[in-house]
Image: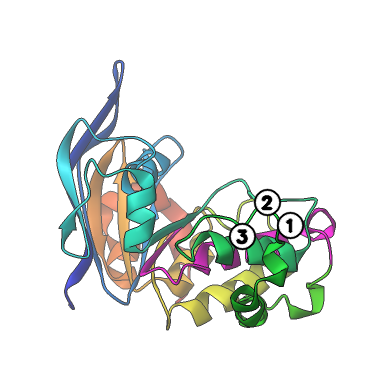
Amino acid sequence: MTESLLSVQSINKHFGAVQASDNFSLEVASGELHALIGPNGAGKTTVLNQLCGEILPDSGQILFSGRRITRMPAYRRAQLGLARSYQITSVFTHLTVRQNLSLAIQAHRGHSFRFWKKAVDDPVVRRRVLPAMARVDLEARADVPAANLSHGEKRQLEVGMALAGHPKMLLLDEPYAGMGPGGAVELTKLIRRLKAEVTILLVEHDMGAVFSLADRITVMVYGQAIASGAPDEIRTHPQVREAYLGDEANGCST
């Protein structure tokens, strides 16, 4: 395995009597798509929130790109190259695809906004916005308000906005949630292309997508990582089948 880009070492997080992360550890190698799976309530989103700095672990440590980020603010983690898309789409619905991506590009340029100048009029932003739209297959929807996009297209736009800062790693929180069959197919194509460009940590319940896309999989149950390995290892792992996959594993193909 190549060197770890993300190393999560025995993190713990309590919410009252609930232990959401229980000595949880995870290694994500540079260049891989690593899936984090588990039943509802396993603690997966809590882990993502600790990785991106929205909440802090009670103990343990998190290393990203060789730096300790355990207690680093969220904006500093983003500056280091850690980007996230959320389970619920978070785009500016009253703005067009072009305007959403232009704002995301401007926000990552490293200087304050120019209050009397539109982001789309910035020459640097204008150069970058077309490739940004092409990256997520939204060129034909450039001037469509985000409110008028399909659910799948909103997901594509959100991923495009997360990619605007050219991150080293992308955290995807259940991108297939609420997705119809057609949108799921297009999203799978997009994620497969992005695998060649950026390291990805995918949290997902769609086992077909997980086993099709992932290089490695970690299974989380009750705040703990009970197994981690290649898809074939996870599919046949007795503890994983008993705790989570069950008969689903028989229907998953790589």
Q: Is residue 28 above or below residue 135?
A: above
Q: Disc 3 marks which residue?
A: 158
Numbered disc 2: secondary structure:
loop
Q: Name the image colouring.
A: rainbow
Name the one closer to the observer, 119 or 47: 119
Q: Which quadrant of the figure contains the C terminus?
A: bottom left
Mark 1, residues whose alpha carbon is within 10 Å: few (<14), some, or many (≥20)?
some
**What numbered label is drawn on residue 178?**
2
Q: Is residue 151 above or below residue 168?
A: above
Mark 3 or 1, closer to the camera: 3
Name the one closer to the observer, 238 or 118: 118
Mark 3, residues whose alpha carbon is within 10 Å: few (<14), some, or many (≥20)?
many
**What numbered label is drawn on residue 3?**
none
Range of magenta residues = 144-173
Question: Does the stretch in magenta take in 160?
Answer: yes
**Residue 84 pos. (x, y %):** 46, 55
Q: CA distance from mark 3 to mark 1?
A: 11 Å
Numbered disc 1: secondary structure:
helix
Query: Badges 2 and 1: C-beta atoms under 8 Å apart?
Result: yes
